[in-house]
Image (cartoon, grey):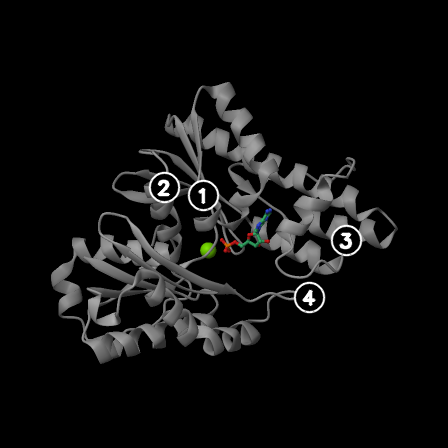
Amino acid sequence: MISLGVESTAHTFGIGIINDKGEVLANAKDMYKTEKGGILPTEAKEHHLRLKNEILERALKEAKLRIEDMDIISFSQGPGLPPCLVVGKDFAKELALKYKKPLVGVNHLISHLEIGKIFTKAKDSVFILATGANTQIIAFEGEKYRIFGECLSIAVGNALDKFGRNIDLGFPAGPRIEELAKKGKYIEMPYVVKGMDVEYSGIVTHAVNLYKKGAKKEDLCFSIQETIFSMLTEVAERAMAHTGKKELLLIGGVAANKRLIEMLTIMCNERKAKFYVVPVEYSGDQGVMIAWQGVLEYKRNKKYYNNLDIKKVDINSNWRIDG
Ligand code: AMP
Ligand code: MG
């Protein structure tokens, strides 16, 4: 069985193709970026509309397949930015109707977790989902994914991007902050963990104020990373202690960060737990994870998808992972 997945929840338009053995056949994507300023949903939408056909062509070429060869068409149904989600939904619908294929709308967050599982040997882990829009500590308990802790205001990736926007690093700021941090020294930052939850907006405001007063970019990048990643490490460790799980799996775009990986490696070594990170190519948003989640959902509920009235399928922009 071969699945084509369309990703368009936020900055990235991606098309992935995978078979039901978990072999990736194509991973074509393009990310909307800016030199200065953050992500503007309407501009991201324009980006997706402009590139969707080209990315589809690239994916099919890479896989050496035609759309006729697909068994299902999957798409990111939510959560995400509505203008962006609509582009992916309409495109996937159009393909499903034209080529008479089942359409499978999937949860973008769960697909991040499931793709992490096929690329690592993790079996029963606590997950840290660290993306632009989400920060959640998750574990599978009692037959479903449950959230043990999350960000109270803005997500870890968003905190980095917001800070970056204020010091002119452009979007996405995470990789630039990681580079600058290598030359920085520590300045004290507010550290806010409430139970199992983390709060990042105060740190961003504090760091931006220090920047306006003349603090060095490098020092602020180093300190913001140290602080927000320590907070995440603390709650992940507590979730592992609570659930008794001996594995941790880091996923989401922020999983590209070497310093975060280093902190979590140390924590897991101290607990004699295994630590896994999703490969960088699959840590951020891409269509492969959507295609894979489509395989899982379709196999679970074939009858439903084979009888679905595709014309009525819509986005679910606030879809929670435990919903
Ligand atoms: P996602 O939403 O999962 O696609 O992830 C995108 C987010 O990951 C953005 O907020 C980026 O700033 C962030 N990101 C990407 N690379 C890095 C990095 N090396 N360090 C920190 N954050 C990163
Ligand atoms: Mg994502």
Q: Earlier in the sequence, mark 3 or mark 2?
A: 2
User: How far, Cα to Cα, is label 3 from label 4?
Assistant: 14 Å
Disc 4 Cβ-to-ligand 1 distance below 8 Å: no
Locate residue 262: give its quadrant: top right
Res 82 seen here: yes
User: How far, Cα to Cα, is label 3 from label 2?
Assistant: 37 Å
Q: Are marks 1 and 2 in contact (CB under 8 Å)?
A: yes
Query: In the structure shown, which secondary structural element does the residue marked by tag 1 occupy?
Result: loop
Q: Residue flagged by tag 4: what amino acid is it?
A: Gly
Residue occupying the far right of the picture: 214
Query: Looking at the image, is mark 3 or mark 4 nearer the viewer?
Result: 4
**In front of the other: 279 or 245:** 279
Query: Looking at the image, is mark 1 or mark 3 nearer the viewer?
Result: 1
* Side (left or right) of 70 relative to 191: left
Query: What numbered label is drawn on residue 119?
Result: 2
Residue shown at the point (45%, 63%) measured from the top left: 29
Q: Position of residue 10 (x, y in %)?
A: 49, 65
Query: In the structure shown, which secondary structural element does the residue marked by tag 3 occupy?
Result: helix
Please determine whether, in this image, residue 265 is positioned above or below residue 73. above
Query: What numbered label is drawn on residue 279?
Result: 1
Query: What numbered label is drawn on residue 37?
Result: 4
Please determine whether, in this image, residue 216 is positioned above or below residue 9. above
